[in-house]
């Protein structure tokens, strides 16, 4: 229906133009805010205490590196954990290579401790 109405008005304008009668299209008044034309609810900043006229700002070349959240937060926890795990694996490997009997005893103590904790958690009192 909308398409038929649009085509009919287009044909009518063409016929009138061919007859020499110029018909101007009425501009429809847009309701609401035209976001392409203006910034909605924009507040201009108040003049400050300091002179900023000497500051140089190139809007075409901003430094986005300083704006990243990752740089503000620092190193991620999962990255720290992964690095620490790699260090632990390396230490364990070195310990096994250099002092094999002591490394086996330490590993057995860890395993037996974990086994005892698992047993304690599984047993209902």
Image (cartoon, grey):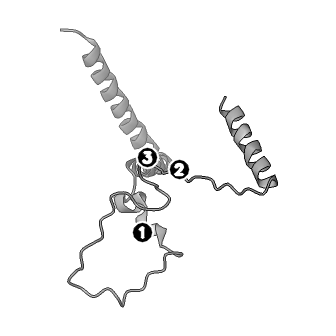
Q: What residue lies at 41% left-to-right and 49% top-to-bottom?
A: 32
What residue is disc 2 on? 28
Depth check: give the residue in front, 32 or 65.
32
Real-space Cα distance between discs 2 and 1?
A: 45 Å
The extreme right residue here reads: 18
Front position among marks 2 and 1: 2
User: Measured along the vertical axis of the image, is residue 121 above or below residue 96?
Assistant: above
Picture coordinates of residue 53, whole percent (x, y):
35, 88
What residue is disc 1 on? 66
Depth check: give the residue in front, 35 or 27.
27
Depth check: give the residue in front, 71 or 12.
12
Labels 2 and 1: the sequence-earlier one = 2
What residue is disc 3 on? 85
**Mark 1 and 3 residues: CB-CB less than 8 Å, in contact?**
no
Q: Secondary structure at mark 3?
A: helix
Real-space Cα distance between discs 1 and 3?
A: 30 Å
User: Measured along the vertical axis of the image, is residue 17 above or below residue 105?
Assistant: below
Real-space Cα distance between discs 2 and 3?
A: 66 Å
The extreme bottom residue here reads: 54
Picture coordinates of residue 60, whole percent (x, y):
53, 75
Q: Secondary structure at mark 1?
A: helix
Q: What residue lies at 82% left-to-right and 53% top-to-bottom?
A: 18
Q: What residue lies at 17% left-to-right and 8% top-to-bottom?
A: 125
């Amino acid at each position: 229906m909308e398409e038929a109405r649009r085509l009919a008005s287009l044909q009518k304008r063409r016929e009138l133009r061919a007859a020499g009668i110029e018909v101007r299209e009425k501009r429809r008044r847009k309701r609401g805010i035209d976001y392409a034309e203006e910034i909605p609810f924009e507040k201009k900043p108040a003049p400050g205490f300091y002179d900023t006229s000497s500051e140089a700002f190139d809007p075409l070349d901003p430094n986005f590196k300083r704006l990243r959240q990752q740089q503000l937060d620092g190193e991620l926890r999962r990255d720290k954990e992964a690095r620490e795990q790699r260090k632990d694996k390396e230490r364990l490997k070195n310990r096994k290579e250099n002092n094999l009997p002591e490394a086996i005893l330490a590993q057995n103590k860890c395993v037996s401790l974990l086994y005892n904790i698992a047993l304690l958690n599984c047993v209902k009192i």
